Image (cartoon, rainbow, N blue to C red):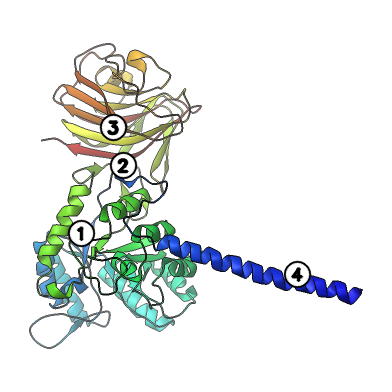
Amino acid sequence: MRNKVCFIVAFLFVAGIFYGANLQQKSAKKERMWMERSPKEQIAGTNYKDVRIKKFPIAVQCWTFRKFSFFETLKKVKELSVSYLQPYPGQKLDSEGPVNRFDHNMSEDQIKQVKQKLKEYGIRLVSYGVVHFENNEESMRKVFDFAKKMGIRTIVTEPRYDDFSLIERMVKKYNINIAIHNHPDPSKYAHPETVLEHIKGLDERIGSCADTGHWMRTGVNPVEALRMLKGRITDVHLKDLNEFGTKDAFDVPFGQGKANIQNILAELTLQNYYGYLAVEHENPNEVDNPSPSIKKGIEYIKSITHYQDYEEILKRSYRRYSKHGWNHYGPGYFELDEKTGVLKGHGGMGLFWYSVKKYKDFILELDFKCADKYTNSGIFIRVPDMPKNDDYIYHSFEIQIDDSGKGIHKTAAVYDAEPPNADAFKESGEWNHLKIVFKGKNIQLELNGVGVLDWDAEPRGKVKDFADEGYIGLQNHDSRSPAYFKNIFIKELK
């Protein structure tokens, strides 16, 4: 009897193992099918058409100009009005003289010459790769030392080994990013889940160099891959190809291929991606002159970038947002989540104002959220002078945030002066988008895409007079029902 029981237990144990393995295989297969959907297919739960695409800094991957020397590439990149560059190891340094290569083995004299040329053209190196190094400190140190010497913040690589512990130590020591690049199948990192498996749990400065073109050649939907790697994308090699799922596909100008560049940039916007878009054009038929296609592609990116001509005034440097340029007058304060860029009001009433400059005619766009229906806050525009007392409230307009208010005291009213003509605010806890246009004496407001106010300003209510130019400010009202702000952009109107 005891033997029979043991046999049954053993059988159930083995069956459980096989059942679990089968579930894992099915799950992996399902995930792979999800990843391999065409970029044209709608991704459930995400409406990318409504995303206001942020402006990303554009760099050029030198492989684009592989037919030319590094110094010739600088001239061509300058002609494209691009200021950032990602060199690769092995490009000929100069078209004249002895054959020298750009890489981390250059002599001090060559490095000095490169730095001088970069200065002449006003171009900065922001990343370097794809470069290989062995899994030992001597090999890695040579690359990291070179990156540090050249001011490079990101090293792009494809490690042949699985142990990233030494890479992590070097990242921490040098404060330089590592981005794992993906070449197409059958390369090791062709699929994003492989990259994620290798970097999971490691320092956040170790991430993915997302090559959209190579994903397409592998049959991986770039947007799905970006979603999988959310929060771990360190660099992007941006490409658009004429075909999806074909290894012989070739590069075309952005917007003319199958990649769905708009959705790619929308997803990067939603992720608050902080890095560069490294343009890499590999069309073999255009290797002698890739510039026209690159120019067309960059123009397309600009055309779909909502914030192309705006300045983000709650600024981000490297990975973190900061309050640099902002001051606070009065009681209370704003707490900043440096990673997400979300401001949360505490106490009040005070004014968190952008002191860098005064604005005359402008478009201000931002997102705000109310903790509950009793949230009370506002955006002050054209504050005439540095706030020293509460007198500024009588000489500038406040765009009200108060969903429980009425008329001239409700959300999207010019406080105490002019009511909105429609209710367009969302439920408490949801983000609202507000667009304020102040030109001359005319104030126009859009709330969540709905025009809610068009008013020729005049002294009214508490406002005794207003200036032709002034500062921008956010009000913190109380801690019980705080207001939240993020994505603060402004465009001056000439």
The N terminus appears in which quarter of the rendering?
bottom right
Q: Mark 2 touching mark 1, by CB under 8 A?
A: no
Three-letter amino acid code at the position of disc 2:
Asp
Counting labels gives 4
Q: Position of residue 480 (x, y in %)?
A: 51, 27
Q: Mark 4 touching mark 2, by CB under 8 A?
A: no
Residue 449's disc is 3
- Kindly state the secondary structure of the residue where label 3 is placed: loop
Cα distance in 3D space between marks 2 and 3: 10 Å
The residue shown at (25%, 15%) is 463
Kindly identify which residue carries mark 2: 50
Cα distance in 3D space between marks 4 and 1: 55 Å
Comparing marks 4 and 1, which lies closer to the viewer? 4
Q: Position of residue 386 (x, y in %)?
A: 26, 29
Kindly identify which residue carries mark 1: 254
The C terminus appears in which quarter of the rendering?
top left
Sooner in the amino-acid sequence: mark 3 or mark 4: 4
